[in-house]
Amino acid sequence: VVRALTCEIVALVTSPSQSSGGFALQDEASGVAVAATWAGSLLALGARLARQGAATLDGQLVVALTVPVRDYAAALIAAGWTLAAQIGRPGVPAELVPTLSPGTPVRMVVSGVLVAERFFEAAVIGGRARIHVGPSWWHLDAVDYLTAAPDLPEHRFGRVRLAPAGSMVTRTGHARTWIAEQCRASADVALIGTKTWLVADMGLGIGWGDLAAGFDRLDDILRPDDGRRPSWASTLRSAQLSESTSLSSEAKLSVLDGSSAIRWLPDVATPFAVALIDRSSSDEFAADSILQLRSMGRPLSLEPIGWMPPPGIEALAFEAHR
Amino acid sequence: MSRLQRVSARYLAVEALTTSGVELLAVGDDAGTKLDSAIKQLRQDTQDDDPAVFSELLAVARQLRWRVATEPFPAGYSHERETVLQALLHLAARLKLSLTGYLHGVLDELVAAATTVGQTPPTAGVLLESLTEAGAEDCVIITASARARDGMTRWLGDLGVTTPVVRGTDRELADVVDQAYAAGPPRIFGSSLLSSPRARALTYIFPSWVRDRGLPASTFSAHAQGAIRLRARLFMIGQAPTGILSPAVDDELVPTPLWPRTPVPAELGSDEVLARRVLLGGGLAIMLDQGGEHIRTLDPARPPGERVEFRDVSTIAPGSYLVLREGATESEALFARAIDLLGEGGSDVLDGQQRWKDELDRQLDRCGRAGVTAALRRAGVRAADQAPTWTARTVARPQADRDFELLLGWLGLPLQPHLALANRVRRARLQAMADVREALEDALSMASMDQLDRNGYLRLDLSLPGFAGIIATRVLALAPFEEAVPRRELRLPVPDRSALWLE
């Protein structure tokens, strides 16, 4: 399944007719939709890297890109990775309930709302199975998704309305698992850069195919961890505030957005890293430091990754020794 | 246009430029050629003399030439052009009095040329014509400096032309237009003009005497797949001046300071380090140690709250902004704050720190710098070169745990309590740094970034004790060589006139 999805995302780049036949971006502020090959290509890079999976490299696979302006690029790559990542089939809530011990925190979806609370007990009341989660008793047959979250701290408890599956999520085959995906709590991707800018990029909508199904916001795909939300798929870090010791992370992919972030590249331990150079900035230092790391590692061709830069993007890859 | 449309348009503009290439218009300029030639002649004829005697005159003349090359509008719109010209005339006249006859000729030529470039340069007419042809509304003009931008804007305004004028380093994400005109030769703008274009076509306009007409290249492109490579087509406009012989002297168009060179001693004194002179906005300079700790920088283009960061000294280049403390270096003030944060236990910690520092000092006295460094390296200390800096009380400990462990062993001291005490100082120092960072960001969020950009200098008043006099200042130039300086003079802003004619 993952292979098919990735191929579809990659097809955005290789077949322009397909992209003009339905791939589009939407500016949150203006609502204007724009067809953009470059954006499809950045999504495809993320998806390609996710497909490398358990990499064949001993070291870290670094892809460095230059883009005309930094806007949206890091978030698109991260979203491509997230959309290509595999997710297990969600379990059946009724089967899970007997395994839960009282007091365990759970994530539960009812009528499109994610409820993160403590599970207390299950009972049959008035002939219908109900579960006591948080302050309420819920009809078990109305629960669309349920999972134990024993490590979820109380400050992350709460209720969050989930985003409906838009055209991108649907077209890439995630519609069926979309609820479960939005309940996931692991930051597979770490975005490091100027945080205010990264946050602003999250409002971008991406759509593909039947645009009537709506656009999916990057924020809903990436769900950056703010320390309070009950589920998350990525972390955003400020490159200015980071200390090298705070960069250790559970993430598999780091996207380093701009020169302030790129200086942390030697400290980033994820198996995959993408370094983004903003060409509108006159700062030559980022490019120099990447070339220096490359000279200490092993230069790689992009062909084995199965991705080639579209017009306007320059790219190189190398294996960094860890 | 929405932000998304602007971003998309930039990607398309790169494609358009890659297909069409860029145009170079070299415009015949008689007066400018004479000025350029006179400057080169002066360089050549004074090569064997004391350069200091001519340095200011050369600096002023280069500033005038720089303006001629990058300000394609009448001289009257060029801010303080008259001041530059008068300074040149004054310096030339003074030199003439003190010099023997053989240089009088070249000084006369320089004065004559400087006086005639005070008219409207031929590039101005070519630019206006081009704007009319391309449709002034669909164009943008890119200048090399803020002064050129302001002069150009006023001139066009008086003519009723509404073409926007921006500076090459401006990063504002504006609408992409049909045609951009850059006022000056390609190299002075750097590669971002070509690789992150604001228009679907780009033309550089400059006087024909500018010889360096190559396109700037990025080091990344040379190794990248999908590298952006642009063709350039050169057009000569008007008559290239004839009969002016210009000496083949290597003389850069971009004004650079003439650095006074002091010889580096064979062996450094115990309190000396090697450092580079860095000229700064606001008529200041600092001595910057290249291998030293990170330095606080500022990026005015970033949003409030994320503007300040510590950077490796090697990344500092002209155009960077530094955040410095007046009167004393920051490490002293940070140290004082860190000790304050330690509270009552502060003096015990200091005593403990002093024990190993004194011991290291004794070894330095006994075996000398080289001896200690060599012995520590043999003991396995990786940062052995930095050993002399570890005696300063403001330095908490060697960076690496292993180095500190080996150092204590070599000094014959037990690991504890020294490691624990040094770690407390380090933690307190990190906290002090975070406090300062926060106070700085607060002060900067209320300060005018426009003013900083315009003046290259900004004073900040922090509410933090010991951090009253903080300045943000732009790096104008870095000396290409190092000098030996006492450690206490490092990073201390002092007045310096060398940058007077740079901006």
Image: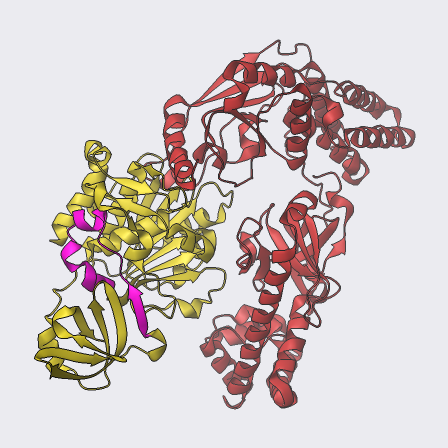
* Residue A301 in sight in this render: no
**Residue at the farthest front position:** A126
* Magenta segment: A157-182
Front-lying residue, B171 or B425: B171
A189 to A98, vertically: above or below: above
**Does residue A96 appear in this view?**
yes
Residue drawn at x 80%, y 28% as measured from the top left? B82
Q: Magenta includes A127?
A: no
Q: Give residue A136's position: percent from left, percent from top.
A: 24, 78
**Image vertical order of residue A7 relative to residue A250, above or below:** above
Find chain A in the image and tell me its colour: yellow
The quarter of the picture where the N terminus of chain B appears is: top left
User: Where does residue B387 sit, x and y in percent of width and height?
Assistant: 57, 73
Name which residue lies at 29% across and 67% down.
Answer: A231
Q: Quadrant of residue A227?
A: bottom left
Indicate the position of residue A16 as horizontal and vertical percent values: 22, 33
Q: Residue at x 11, y 78 (%)?
A: A129
Above or below B103: residue A219? below
Which image quarter: residue A273? bottom left
Q: Is residue B428 left or right of residue B265?
A: left
Which quarter shows the C terminus of chain B? Answer: top right
Q: Specify the color scheme.
A: by chain
Horizontal placement of A49 versus B292: left or right? left
Depth check, front residue: B496 or B462? B462
- Residue B94 location (% of width, % of height): 89, 32
Q: Give the mark count.
A: 0
**Foreground residue, B203 or B152?**
B152
* Residue A179 covered by magenta stretch: yes
Q: Which chain is red?
A: B
